[in-house]
Amino acid sequence: MADEINPVVILGSGPAGLTAALYTARANLNPLLIEGTVPGGQLTITTEVENYPGFEKGIQGPEMMEVFRRQAARFGTRFIAGEVTEARLGKHPFELVTDGKVIKAEALIISTGASAKLLGIESEKRLMGYGVSACATCDGAFFKNKEAIVVGGGDTAMEEAIFLTRFCTKVTIVHRRDSLRASKIMQDRARKNPKIEFVWDSAIEEIIGDPKNGVSGARLKNVKTGAITEFKTDAVFMAIGHQPNTAIFKGQLDMDETGYLKVKPGSTRTNIEGVFAAGDAADRVYRQAITAAGTGCMAAIDAERWLETRKEG
């Protein structure tokens, strides 16, 4: 039915999107969820998740997302594979284009997530979740009494490195320049930490290891001399930033310079009435599954209340 208007459409199927789906489905809003290019979001490239309440023995990331999905489906969430290539938010009902079809929505919840910026090398992709990670707070505890590399030179890299010193015996920050971009306070903290060392003017050419045994080292190339050295390590953490998946909303929704969607304080409401944002698409600070799920719940309740007021009006 081309002209069907969906009460709620949710974009993205990570913890935020699936929690929003669960809440709106239980509120009898018959939500339609468009899964996006990576169904399940960033957790599908995570192996063990030990810090999500309710899973005392830990759970594999993809399995956890499957549990979320089944729970949302149980209450009647409808799912569509694929991604939205165009969003027309200047008219109401909102129009979303996916696979050439137009889907109409009375309320829209955006939970498209963010993607960690990666180096783009084959070994990084192959070993992601097996010693390569883009989240120290998620995976640091797996490397107790081991050594780790952190790639990057900004505040994120310093924060990740400092956090990892709680578990690791040594953390080496590998940076392609000879000075850091991080704020002075973060630089000072990292430099003062006895467990942190620096390798300057260097980039990772290849990560050594295999999924069965994990990471055993990295090949580093000095960008000034071209010299290649082999560096022993048990883990490589990428800390070169995140990019929110919000490009299609540019010029329509308020966002910061990186592309994170801005919401009204204490809510998930964006600058357009009826459009709500949850999860990593709007969160540049915490970026955890639990905080994404929390804002997914908030967005669902905000959307439900907004639809109710429209009905009454």
Image (cartoon, helix red, strand yellow):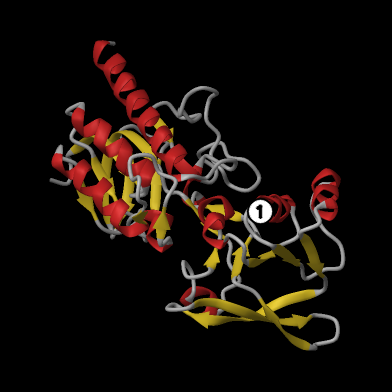
The secondary structure type at the circle numbered 1 is: helix
Q: Residue at x 29, y 57 (%)?
A: 63
In the current view of this chain or complex, which residue is farthest to the front? 145
Residue 41 visible to the viewer: yes
Q: Residue at x 63, y 79 (%)?
A: 217
- Vertical arrangement, residue 147 with respect to residue 51, above or below: below
- Vertical arrangement, residue 265 with respect to residue 162, above or below: above
- Vertical arrangement, residue 133 with respect to residue 64, above or below: below
Provide the residue designation for mark 1.
160
**Residue 197 located left or right of residue 116:** right
Measured as percent of width and height from the top left, residue 10 is found at 32, 41
Residue 165 in which image quadrant: bottom right
Alpha-carbon neighbours of circle 1 within 10 Å: few (<14), some, or many (≥20)? many
In the current view of this chain or complex, which residue is farthest to the bottom? 227
**Residue 8 located left or right of residue 198:** left
Q: Residue at x 21, y 26 (%)?
A: 27
Front in this rendered view, residue 169 or 58: 169
Q: Amino acid at mark 1?
A: Glu
